């Protein structure tokens, strides 16, 4: 029995257990328009933490790799060819990918190349325009997120997971359709998911919540909380004169 358990764990560890448990809970990206950089937190198996130059980014708003593509195939020529031929996978489901090309197109090691999947599937063009507008024009130019668009930092309780993850879309449809706040559809979604909520929360707590290194100063000194949901302060601030100069200097070359 012990040997069978060890064999089972060894068999599924690389593909299923390691990417899901005992790792960072999720990747995190911070877009900083003052420094014009993108700060990335992600597990080492997916490229590790990195700071990327906003001015080099290229957006692909309707992109998805073939299902069989693995992270270590990003730089593989044949894998890239399959990605182009079968973008979207069997179902053709696509999303927003941000791509940084190699610093030198002729570099066989493709140094500087990176790729980020950003946001949920099918969010492509609207999400890219939101990010681009924020980075190029400022926070005052983007719409304030509605109550369904806030994401929780840190870990969920079972009840929070149900409301914010499993039932949020159904609740939104209830509100839009004038069906009250607990339609038959929402009740069905609850019955299908409530038993799994405690297990989901347990799985979360087997992971670590990633935080941005202080030495990056990715928040420009405006400390942000690392738990909770919804608006937080400071969501708007007046940057110092030094930050304004640092922000305007790169724009002179755009």
Image: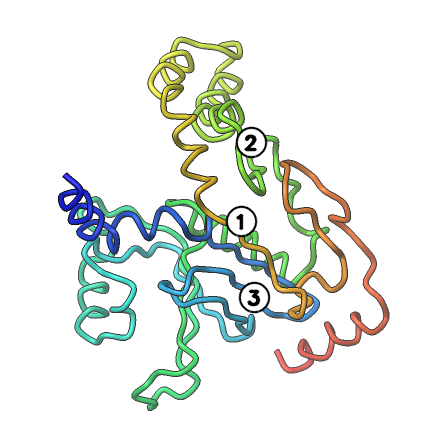
Residue 247 in which image quadrant: bottom right
Q: Residues within 10 Å of mark 1 (few under 14, many from 20)?
A: some
Q: How many marks?
A: 3
| Picture disc at residue 38 | 3
Residue 69 in which image quadrant: bottom left
Front residue (pair 211, 3): 3
Nearer to us of marks 2 and 1 is 1
Left or right side of 60 for 79: left
- As drawn, 31 above or below 91: below
Q: Residue at x 35, y 63 (%)?
A: 45
Q: Earlier in the sequence, mark 3 or mark 2?
A: 3
| Residue at mark 3 to residue at mark 2: CA–CA distance | 25 Å
| Picture disc at residue 148 | 2
Percent of width and height locating residue 146: 61, 34
Percent of width and height locating residue 154: 57, 42
| Residue at mark 1 to residue at mark 3: CA–CA distance | 19 Å
Q: Residue at x 44, y 63 (%)?
A: 98
Nearer to us of marks 1 and 3 is 1
Q: Earlier in the sequence, mark 2 or mark 1?
A: 2
- As drawn, 196 above or below 41: above
Residue denoted by label 1? 209
Q: Residues within 10 Å of mark 2 (few under 14, many from 20)?
A: few
- As drawn, 198 above or below 210: above
């Amino acid at each position: 029995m012990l040997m069978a358990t060890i064999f089972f764990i060894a068999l599924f560890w690389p593909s299923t257990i390691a990417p899901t448990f005992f790792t960072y809970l999720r990747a995190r990206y911070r877009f900083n328009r003052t420094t014009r950089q993108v700060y990335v937190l992600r597990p080492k198996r997916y490229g590790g933490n990195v700071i990327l130059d906003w001015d080099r980014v290229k957006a692909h708003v309707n992109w998805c790799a073939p299902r069989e593509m693995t992270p270590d195939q990003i730089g593989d020529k044949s894998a890239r060819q399959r990605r182009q031929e079968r973008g979207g996978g069997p179902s053709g489901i696509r999303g927003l990918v941000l791509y940084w090309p190699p610093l030198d197109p002729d570099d066989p090691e493709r140094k500087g190349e990176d790729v980020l999947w950003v946001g949920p599937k099918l969010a492509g063009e609207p999400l890219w325009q939101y990010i681009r507008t924020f980075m190029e024009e400022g926070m005052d130019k983007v719409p304030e997120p509605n109550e369904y668009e806030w994401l929780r930092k840190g870990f969920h309780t079972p009840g929070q997971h149900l409301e914010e993850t499993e039932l949020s879309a159904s609740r939104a449809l209830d509100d839009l359709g004038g069906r009250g706040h607990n339609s038959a559809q929402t009740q069905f979604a609850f019955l299908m998911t409530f038993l799994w909520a405690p297990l989901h929360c347990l799985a979360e707590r087997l992971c670590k919540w990633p935080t941005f290194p202080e030495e990056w100063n990715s928040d420009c000194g405006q400390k942000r909380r690392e738990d909770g949901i919804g608006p937080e302060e400071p969501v708007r601030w007046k940057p110092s004169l030094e930050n304004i100069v640092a922000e305007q200097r790169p724009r002179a070359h755009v």
